[in-house]
Image: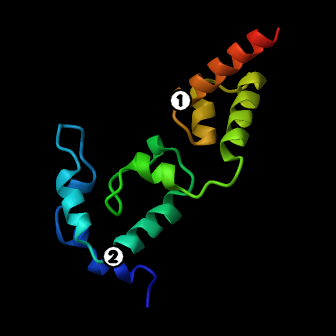
Amino acid sequence: MSRFDWMEDARCAQVDPELWHPDGSGVGYSDAKKICARCPVQQQCADFAQETEGDLAHSHRHGLWAGQLPRRRANQSNKPAGFYVKRRQQIIRLAAGGDMDSYQIAEHVGVDVRTVWRITRQHRQDMGKAA
């Protein structure tokens, strides 16, 4: 017995997989959400998504899993206490090092480049206030 056997019972396995990965042409997730709502293996799907995606930022997550959009799954992930503080410190440290640009830092840390820009901008403002 495989740990993936539950996938055979998934409703998404019986319809067009493109429903779970819209291409941005205006077609959203509404049909996929309706199918997910009736799926008998929704919890296994949610667990699999969490296991697979780990602590990735929402911008690095794709598709609909267990009826949840990437941002919601990112917000529900099991991040340890202090995760965001440590991530912020890591971004500031890498930016101060000067060896990586914002895009490289974002890729290294697993966040969107806008997160790097926001954190470094806030850090510069905080340092200006402290002076």
Three-letter amino acid code at the position of disc 1: Val
Q: Residue at x 31, y 59 (%)?
A: 67
Q: Secondary structure at mark 1?
A: helix
- Residues at discs 1 and 2 in contact (Cβ within 8 Å): no
Point out residue 76 in the picture as x, y percentages from the top left corner.
50, 55
Inspect the image, locate mark 2, and give the three-letter code of the amino acid beneath it: Val
Which residue is denoted by mark 1 in the rendering? 113
Specify the quadrant of the image occupied by residue 23.
top left
48 w.r.t. 108: above or below: below
Residue denoted by label 2: 41
Hey, which quadrant is residue 130 in on the image? top right
The residue at the point 39 percent across, 69 percent down is 45
Q: Classify 10 Å Cα crowding around label 1: few (below 14), some (14-19), many (20 and above).
A: some
Q: Quadrant of the C terminus?
A: top right
Left or right relative to 72: residue 33: left
Q: Nearer the viewer, mark 1 or mark 2?
A: 2
Q: Residue at x 65, y 20 (%)?
A: 122
Residue at (57, 38) in percent of width and height:
107
Q: Is residue 5 above or below residue 92?
A: below
**Distance of mark 1 from mark 2, alpha carbons?**
35 Å
The label shown at residue 71 is none
Q: Which of these two is toward me, 126 or 46?
A: 126
User: Along the polypeptide, which appears first: circle 1 or circle 2?
Assistant: 2
x%, y% of residue 94?
73, 30
Q: Is residue 97 left or right of residue 110?
A: right
- Name the outermost residue toward the bottom: 1
Count of marks overlaid on the render? 2
Q: Whole-percent x and y of residue 93? A: 76, 30
Residue 39, position in %: x, y?
26, 72
